[in-house]
Image (cartoon, rainbow, N blue to C red):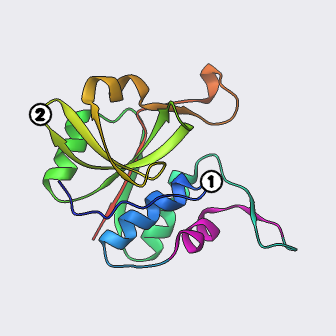
Amino acid sequence: MLKIKPFKQSYGMCGAASMKMVMDYYGIIHSEKYWAMKIANKIDPKTGKIILFNGLSDKKMLRIAKSLGFKGVWKEEALISELRKYISKNIPVIVNWYSPEQGGHFSVVVGFEKNNILLADPHFGKIKKMLTDDFKDKWFDFIGPPAKKNLLVRPIVVWYK
């Protein structure tokens, strides 16, 4: 299992919290709010609060990582074998999946144990163990309203030095 310190997200901040966990892993330490401000595409000028996230914030995460000198990839239709490959190289993977607690949700894959996938789940702020087959059934998200045209299947974002 990768040595990623779980982080409990603020409301609606699973993307920023996942980015924080991965960047902390690579030694680039900033707050959840810092990463949220980088990922957000609209900020209330009066309050400074994030009022809208880009529906494809995982792609924006990758652009930010690349601007910091990382290499990486965003893709759909990833396979469990690809997740295992990255983990075997000590590279964390951010997955976009459908969580019963959150709906569309980002978490960080940190390892595998037998038939289980291990996720640093920012909703709980701890490592979540899930049967890999159950995870595969939930590994999707929608960009916008739930409709086939808005469906993302098995999306991942990965960056590394």
Q: Which residue is mark 1?
A: 11
Q: Earlier in the sequence, mark 2 or mark 1?
A: 1
The 10 Å Cα crowd at callout 2, few under 14, some 14 to 19, many 20 or more, is few
Q: Amino acid at mark 1?
A: Tyr
Residue 40 horizontal/vertical position (percent): 66, 62
Q: In which quarter of the view is residue 115 placed?
A: top left
Q: In the shown orientation, is residue 133 left or right of residue 47?
A: left
Instruction: Name the image quarter holding the C terminus.
Output: bottom left
Residue at x 57% of width, y 53% of height: 57
Where in the figure is residue 108, as x and y percent of width and height?
36, 51
Question: Tag 2's secondary structure?
Answer: loop
Between tags 2 and 1, which lies in front?
1
Query: Could you tell me residue 96's position as x and y percent?
Result: 46, 41
Q: Residue furthest right?
A: 46
Magenta stretch contains residue 35: yes
From which residue to which does the magenta span run? 31-44
Does dot 1 land on a helix, a strand or a loop?
Answer: loop
Judge from the rendering whether residue 73 lies leftward or rightward of residue 161; answer left or right. right
Q: Residue at x 51, y 52 (%)?
A: 58
Please name the residue shown 42% across and 27% down the image.
138
Choose top left, top right, bottom left or bottom right for residue 89.
bottom left
In the image, which disc is placed on residue 114?
2
Dot 2 amino acid type: Lys
In the shown orientation, is residue 59 left or right of residue 25?
A: right
